[in-house]
């Protein structure tokens, strides 16, 4: 009886330790994200799986052209996947003759599929604190496993 | 055999500690005068508060809560403020570019209790709920200040939609 109890405690400890290790890895190192929606076509399609890393957002090293995963500014329980188009101080064209300067501590995010994307053009610049991770490569589907290049 | 065991304990101990902080919360020092008189009422002493992450894990916050959030101006800085308005509220601002503003979806309006000496929504506008990291529940240090932080909005800062409702109720009587 004592032995069973001891075994149970031992395996619980084991579970807690590895659960915490997994939590820290997914929260601070690398993470997998399943994408849905057409806003990043043609780079990313619905149901593609991305490998993302949390280190460069933590070090505040986000560059123009990176694909980032961020919390949606209008709904914190949802995440959005967009490309960084403007950094603080950049001038963004918002209309025929109107410009907007990205404020300090924010980024300008846009989807690659300009006609079908809810992004900074509709809800304005996004605070950098909402950025969770940066997409490194596509790991699923198998036939187009690829690293993301910085274009533009 | 002693050293590998010791290293193994550190290897597992750190993730367990980080996860505990991430899920439940931690104690933090409050800097600055922006939340006087609720926090740091005396300039010479600093308060330590318990920040509960558990309380905001689904981003449900109420008016009057004291919350900590990542500053929208500088992502490496954390600020502690009081929630004055939640989404849909109509706020009479103090020195913001619009005199009256409706808090948009998924945002809230935060202000320091020390009006005029606080870097808050009156400077940078409504903030996104995703920036909220924790809710301050109680003061844990110094012992003379032990207390649970009450949740309230100062009467003069109540959102306009609540004020007009209470006026209507008075008018009915």
Image: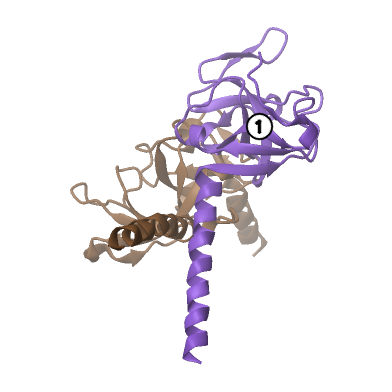
Chain colours: A purple, B brown
Q: Is residue A70 visible?
A: no
Q: Residue furthest front?
A: B1
Q: Quarter of the image holding residue B127?
A: top right
User: Where residue B117 sits in the image (x, y, percent)?
Assistant: 34, 37
User: Where residue A14 sits in the image (x, y, percent)?
Assistant: 50, 68
- Callout 1 crowding tier (Cα within 10 Å): few <14, some 14–19, many ≥20: some
Seen from the viewer's position, the closer of residues A69 and A9 is A9
Q: Is residue B80 left or right of residue A97?
A: left
User: Where residue A47 sits in the image (x, y, percent)?
Assistant: 79, 41
Q: Residue furthest bottom?
A: A1
Asked which secondary structure carries label 1, the reply is strand
Seen from the viewer's position, the closer of residues A47 and B115 is A47
Provide the chain ID for the residue under circle 1: A
What residue do we see at 44% from left, 55% from top?
A: B15
Q: Would you place residue A124 above or below residue A4 in this image?
A: above
Q: Is residue A60 left or right of residue B43?
A: right
Seen from the viewer's position, the closer of residues A26 and B168 is A26
Q: Which residue is mark 1?
A: A137
Rendered-image quadrant of the N terminus of chain B? bottom left
Seen from the viewer's position, the closer of residues A18 and B18 is A18
Q: Would you place residue A102 above or below residue A49 in this image?
A: above
What residue do we see at 58% from left, 53% from top?
A: B59
What residue do we see at 68% from left, 16% from top?
A: A94
Q: Residue furthest top?
A: A97
Q: Would you place residue A3 above or below residue B64 in this image?
A: below
Q: Would you place residue A89 above or below residue B51 in this image?
A: above
Q: Is residue A11 visible?
A: yes
Q: Residue furthest left?
A: B44
What residue do we see at 56% from left, 56% from top?
A: B57
């Amino acid at each position: 009886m004592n032995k069973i109890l001891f075994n149970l405690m031992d395996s619980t400890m084991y579970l807690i330790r590895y659960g915490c290790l997994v939590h820290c890895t997914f929260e601070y190192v690398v993470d997998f994200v399943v994408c849905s929606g057409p806003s990043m076509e043609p780079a990313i399609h619905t149901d593609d799986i991305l490998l993302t890393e949390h280190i460069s957002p933590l070090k505040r090293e986000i560059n123009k052209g990176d694909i980032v995963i961020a919390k949606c500014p209008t709904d914190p329980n949802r995440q959005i996947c967009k490309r960084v188009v403007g950094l603080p101080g950049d001038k963004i064209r918002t209309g025929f003759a109107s410009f907007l300067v990205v404020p300090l501590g924010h980024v300008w995010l846009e989807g690659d599929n300009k006609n079908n994307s809810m992004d900074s053009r509709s809800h304005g610049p996004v605070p950098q604190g909402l950025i969770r991770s940066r997409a490194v490569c596509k790991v699923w589907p198998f036939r187009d496993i690829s690293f993301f290049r910085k274009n533009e | 055999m002693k050293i590998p065991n010791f290293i193994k304990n550190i290897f597992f101990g750190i993730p367990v500690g980080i996860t505990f902080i991430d899920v439940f919360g931690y104690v933090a020092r409050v800097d600055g005068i922006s939340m006087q008189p609720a926090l740091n009422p005396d300039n010479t002493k600093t308060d330590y508060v318990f920040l509960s992450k558990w309380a905001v894990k689904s981003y449900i916050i109420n008016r009057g809560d004291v919350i900590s959030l990542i500053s929208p101006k500088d992502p490496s800085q954390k600020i502690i403020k009081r929630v004055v308005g939640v989404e849909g509220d109509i706020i009479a601002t103090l020195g913001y570019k619009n005199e009256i503003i409706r808090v948009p979806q998924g945002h809230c309006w935060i202000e320091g209790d020390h009006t005029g000496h606080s870097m808050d929504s009156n400077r940078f506008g409504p903030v996104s709920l995703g920036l909220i990291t924790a809710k301050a529940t109680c003061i844990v240090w110094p012992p003379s200040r032990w207390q649970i932080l009450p949740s309230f909005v100062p009467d003069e800062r109540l959102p306009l939609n609540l004020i007009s409702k209470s006026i209507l109720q008075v008018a009915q009587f």
